[in-house]
Image (cartoon, rainbow, N blue to C red):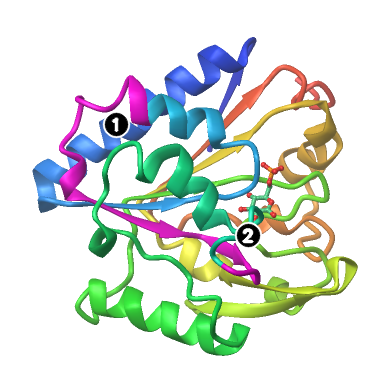
Amino acid sequence: MNLLIYKTLEELNQDLADYVIKIAEMSIEENDRFNFVLTGGSSPKALYHFLATEGQHRIDWEKVYFFFGDERNVPANDDNYNGLMAKKTILDPLGIKEDHIFYVDTTLAPEKAAIEYKKAIDKHFNGEDPVFDLILLGMGDDAHTASIFPHTTLVKDEEVNVAAVYVEKLDTYRISFTAALINKADNIAFLVFGENKAEALKHVIGDAEKNPDLYPSQLIDPIDGKLTWFTDVAATKLLED
Ligand SMILES: O=C1O[C@H](COP(=O)(O)O)[C@@H](O)[C@H](O)[C@H]1O
């Protein structure tokens, strides 16, 4: 595990954008495509803007396939739909073609949407192991990642899958990659900054004894891949040296 701590968000996003582009270049050189899983929420908006502006001419974006590690069970035109945020901040600005974007179909019931999403992933990987080149993750201040929330069924789901999950505290369904699917990736990058994440990060990274039911981000531990945390001083202020 590699923990990177930045003083400013500008530096953090610049470095993370460089990191994404480096992995994209390597994946394209090796496999002629880059399978990139986006995270939702508010944290990645600046990064996506960076990639769509400064990163615009640095790689061949036509060779990039975009996926979502989790989605909210809302219509695609709802501001809470992770796909809409990505569409506005990175996908439309880069002119990404629809057949390179794997949105979660929330017109379907959550269970069905999850099944169809996993089917689409399996088809994209030609039935082989779904090993993504890079999965970007955020973390909520309750230590959830993707939509693996504390005390939900997804915490104990060990299948390599996309699943629907009911999140009681939000009284809503989400559709999410399982930890087992995430952990297959070649590269996993957490983007976590701000003081409101400090308490959760202290437990997720710092606790010797793991308790993923309370801190689901502790489940992220790639099998053969690399895990990098892109954080800032505020988010890491409770970590001991
Ligand atoms: O609900 C979600 O929250 C997490 C963290 O979001 P942030 O707003 O604190 O950046 C995000 O990683 C996840 O994709 C999203 O659906």
Q: Which residue is drawn at 54% across and 20% down?
A: 12
Amino acid type of the residue that numbered disc 2 sits on in the rendered structure: Asp
Q: Crowdedness of circle 1 by 10 Å Cα count: few (<14), some, many (20+)?
A: some
Which of the image's four quarters has the C terminus? top right
In the image shown, does 128 or 175 lie closer to the viewer? 175
Q: In which quarter of the image is residue 184?
A: bottom left
Residue 174's image quarter?
Answer: bottom right
Q: Position of residue 171 (x, y in %)?
A: 85, 73
Mark 2 Cβ and ligand 1 under 8 Å apart: no
Residue 65 located within the stretch drawn in magenta: yes
In the image: residue 2, left or right of residue 121: right
Q: Name the residue under label 2.
A: 78
* Mark linked to residue 21: 1
Disc 2 crowd rating (10 Å Cα; few below 14, some 14-19, many 20+) is: few
**Residue 147 in the figure: left or right of residue 230:** right
Query: Residue 70: in sight, yes or no?
Result: yes
- How far across and how far down the image is residue 34, in percent? 24, 49
Write the residue at 34% across / 74% down. 121
Q: How many labels does the image show?
A: 2
In the image, which is nearer the foreground, mark 1 or mark 2? 2
The furthest residue to the front: 77
First in sequence: mark 1 vs mark 2: 1
Q: Is residue 23 left or right of residue 136?
A: left
- What segment is highlighted magenta in the picture? 52-75
Residue 103 belongs to the span the image colors magenta: no
Query: Measured from the top left, where is residue 131 in percent x and y?
Result: 33, 63
Specify the quadrant of the image occupied by residue 95.
top left
Distance from disc 1 to disc 2, alpha carbons, whole Å, reads: 29 Å
**Whether residue 221 can be seen here:** no
User: Under tag 1, what secondary structure?
Assistant: helix
Query: Which amino acid is tagged 1?
Result: Ile
